[in-house]
Image (cartoon, rainbow, N blue to C red):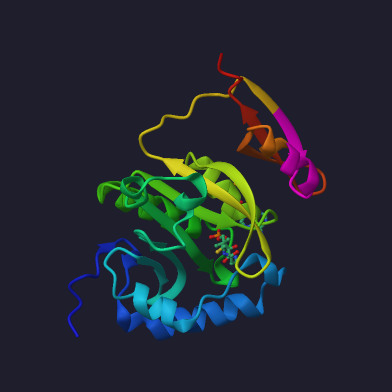
Amino acid sequence: MSDTNVVEIDDIKFLNEQYLDQILKLQKIVIENLSDAASYYVEPVAFFRKQLTIENSVIGFFHNNQLVGFNVATFPGLDDDNIGMGFNFEASELLQVAQIGPAAVHPDYRNEKIFSKLAKEHIKVIEKLGYKHIFLTVAPNNYPTIKIFIDNGFRITQLKIKYNNLLRYILHFDFFNDFKQPKYSVRTPNTDIESQKFIFNLGFYGYNVLKNDNGFDIVFGHDGIKA
Ligand SMILES: CC(C)(COP(=O)(O)OP(=O)(O)OC[C@H]1O[C@@H](n2cnc3c(N)ncnc32)[C@H](O)[C@@H]1OP(=O)(O)O)[C@@H](O)C(=O)NCCC(=O)NCCS
């Protein structure tokens, strides 16, 4: 098979079908080492098989020629799993949606900014491809993922039950809408789900994440009521 759709960027490159086994092997190690099984939704093998045939969908990080991290971007079009449907996007807007995840880094390589680099690279490519929105779902206790995407300009816009009963934040990034500091802000522990439901209902969105003595807080902002 030809390797033409594999782009070299230092130790990061886009992956094709040849990498299916390496991804599944890495994912198996990641699953076996999860501190909270609910924080990672395991997609079926067919999902990876399909995404690996799509250009720019799966990006990998290599160390000594071994895959140690990956990130998947999907381009859902008008499929039911397009998160933009939950925002009442029209069809033309839905076609401009890219979604990020799943992603994983080998437990021996954590906290070395590998996922930060993969996410940044993938966001750049998604922008070059002309998409307007990026969505992703993340468990409210997944500090690294929330932190990385907040640092890249994403906002936490909803709290939902997804993937057969797993609680997830919906994170959104709009390439055409510059982030302004909100007019009002409140801070809650990430574990205080009931307060967050209330805050989301008032139109607040999460825009920062700050470590506290027990874990971390989400900082929510509101732009004020428009007259
Ligand atoms: C989420 C995951 C991909 C992050 O990978 P990573 O390469 O270790 O992340 P990074 O090194 O880029 O870290 C990003 C931030 O999180 C912090 N961080 C990373 N691991 C952490 C940990 N275990 N505890 C606290 N903070 C952590 C980093 O310090 C960094 O924050 P900073 O910018 O304030 O320094 C990895 O932890 C993983 O594979 N988890 C299991 C699967 C999963 O949850 N996937 C994502 C959902 S699909």
Can I make out residue 66 in this image? yes
Residue 192 shows in this picture? no
In the image, taking residue 135 as reference, residue 201 lies left or right, namely right
Residue sitting at the far top: 227
Q: Residue at 37% of width from left, 65% of height from top?
A: 59
Quadrant housing the N terminus: bottom left
Q: Quadrant of the C terminus?
A: top right
> Residue 50 in the image: x percent, y percent?
35, 77
Occupied quadrant, residue 188: top right
The residue shown at (45%, 63%) is 80
Spot occupied by residue 38 in the image (x, y as percentages of width and height): 68, 68
Horizontal side of 218 relative to 223 (left or right) equals right
The mark tally for this picture is 0
Residue at the image position 50 percent from the left and 45 percent from the top: 87
Q: Is residue 200 magenta?
A: no
Vertical order, 13 against 189 (above or below): below
Q: Quadrant of ligand 1?
A: bottom right
* 182, 104: nearer the viewer: 182
**x, y (%) of residue 139?**
65, 58
Q: Is residue 192 above or below residue 72?
A: above
Q: Which residues are magenta?
A: 186-198
Question: What percent of the width, then of the height, locates residue 2?
Answer: 17, 81
Check the image and report above or below for 9 versus 126: below
Residue drawn at (65%, 52%) of the image: 143
**Looking at the image, which residue sits at the far right?**
214
User: Residue 207's quadrant in the figure?
Assistant: top right
